[in-house]
């Protein structure tokens, strides 16, 4: 090769090497978008089955915050005594029969076997804003005892193998009415809980961990024609849409509004910071099931995405704690 040609070739090769050296690094891979769906009280058997079927279709895992009074029949209701109340009192009643308790216990056992999380919604759905630490510890003790011993308390046999582990693994809590106080947060770690999902935030927020308790918050999300914010929970939407009264003729409109709000909140995080999106529900079919219909449409679209995971609160907390442990060891 002539001398000039060799020089040109060398220069081109040098420029290529220099270009490779200063090329932009690959963009960081975004984490999966987490969606955390939960159900409070978890009473109706048909809704247990419906939620589990939704999970099977979409690959989602849910958290069920159970009210322990629904594990007591009219005959066994006095096993529960709320702080400051006489035995057998509850704001939401009790199970209708021993058979209903047995059916609910079966659903809980099936849900756990399928990878779902059982948490505590306390027992009698009382407002604990004025409770002391001792009151909260009493309520937590009632929940654990009744869940762990539900089969024997109600005279239901046989008790499934491993049932009592379910009670021991109930490490999450959501306060009735989302009503909290300082005494609650003093009592939670003492009672062995690792997370609380009673908070409310302006939009999705990453949960902080304080005094050993990871604190989750249901977000306020824009909703409706005027995009006013509302807590991302079916009951709050029910009050927003119809003042807390049934309007079945408007069910389709309410379902569409709810879906649109959920999807917009999801899309914002999915395209942005990917902060977990939390959504809360009850087993009550408000406004002719509008909110469950919206949930099923939403979960069917997003939980099946490869870069989305619809996971339980407990799984989210466990992964984060495992990550922190690995980071600590690696550091």
Image (tube, rainbow, N blue to C red):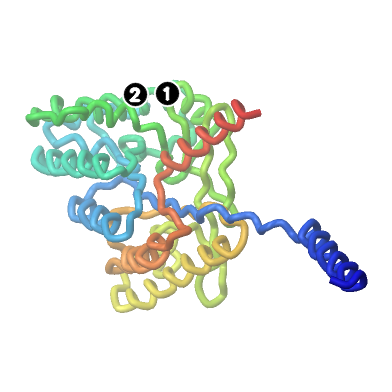
- Residue 241: quadrant of the picture: bottom left
Which residue: 28% across, 60% down?
A: 57
Between marks 2 and 1 in the image, the one whose residue lies nearer the viewer: 1
Q: Quadrant of residue 290?
A: bottom left
Quadrant holding the N terminus: bottom right
| Image: 179 above or below 57 | above
Please tell me which residue lies in front, 111 or 258.
Answer: 111
Q: Are marks 2 and 1 in contact (CB under 8 Å)?
A: yes
Residue at disc 2, secondary structure? helix
The foreground one among 25 and 288 is 25
Residue 51 vertical position relative to residue 97 in the rendered view, above or below: below
Q: Nearer the viewer, residue 101 or 105?
A: 105
State the SS at label 1. loop
In the displayed structure, 230 sits above or below 256; it is above
Residue 325's tag is: none
Mark toward the start of the polypeptide (2 vs 1):
2
In the picture as drawn, the residue positioned furthest to the right comes out as 4
x%, y% of residue 258?
A: 43, 69
Q: Which residue is mark 1?
A: 191
Q: What residue is drawn where x is 8% and y is 41%?
A: 99
- Residue linked to disc 2: 141
What percent of the width, then of the height, locates residue 33? Answer: 51, 56
Residue drawn at (46%, 57%) of the image? 308
Using the rendered image of the protein, determine whether residue 141 is visible from the camera's viewpoint. yes
Foreground: 303 or 96? 303
Q: Residues within 10 Å of mark 2 (few under 14, many from 20)?
A: some
Horizontal arrangement in the rendering, residue 10 relative to residue 37 (left or right)? right
Q: Quadrant of residue 173?
A: top left
Q: Residues within 10 Å of mark 1 (few under 14, many from 20)?
A: some
């Amino acid at each position: 090769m002539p001398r000039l040609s060799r020089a040109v070739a060398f220069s081109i090769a040098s420029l290529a090497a220099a270009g490779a050296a200063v090329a932009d690094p690959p963009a960081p891979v975004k984490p999966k978008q987490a969606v955390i769906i939960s159900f409070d009280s978890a009473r109706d058997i048909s809704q247990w089955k419906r939620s589990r079927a939704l999970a099977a279709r979409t690959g989602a895992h849910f958290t069920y915050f159970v009210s322990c009074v629904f594990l007591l029949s009219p005959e066994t209701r006095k096993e529960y005594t709320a702080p400051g109340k006489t035995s057998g009192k509850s704001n939401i009643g009790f199970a209708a029969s021993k058979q209903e308790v047995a059916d609910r216990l079966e659903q809980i056992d099936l849900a756990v076997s399928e990878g779902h999380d059982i948490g505590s919604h306390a027992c009698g759905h009382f407002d604990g804003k004025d409770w002391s630490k001792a009151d909260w510890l009493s309520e937590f003790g009632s929940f654990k005892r009744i869940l762990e011993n539900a089969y024997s308390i109600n005279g239901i046999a046989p008790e499934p193998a491993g049932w009592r582990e379910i009670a021991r693994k109930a490490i999450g809590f959501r306060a009735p009415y989302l009503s909290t106080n300082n005494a609650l947060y003093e009592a939670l770690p003492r009672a062995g809980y690792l997370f609380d999902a009673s908070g409310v935030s302006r939009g999705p927020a990453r949960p902080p961990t304080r005094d050993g308790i990871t604190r989750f918050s249901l977000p306020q999300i824009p909703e409706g024609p005027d995009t006013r914010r509302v807590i991302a929970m079916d009951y709050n939407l029910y009050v927003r849409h119809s003042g807390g009264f049934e309007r079945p003729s408007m069910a389709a409109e309410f379902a569409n509004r709810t879906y649109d709000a959920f999807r917009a909140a999801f899309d914002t995080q999915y395209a942005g910071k990917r902060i977990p999106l939390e959504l809360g529900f009850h087993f009550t079919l408000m406004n002719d099931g509008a909110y469950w219909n919206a949930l099923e449409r939403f979960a069917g679209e997003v939980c099946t995405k490869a870069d989305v995971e619809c996971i339980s609160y407990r799984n989210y907390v466990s992964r984060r704690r495992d990550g922190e442990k690995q980071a600590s060891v690696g550091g």
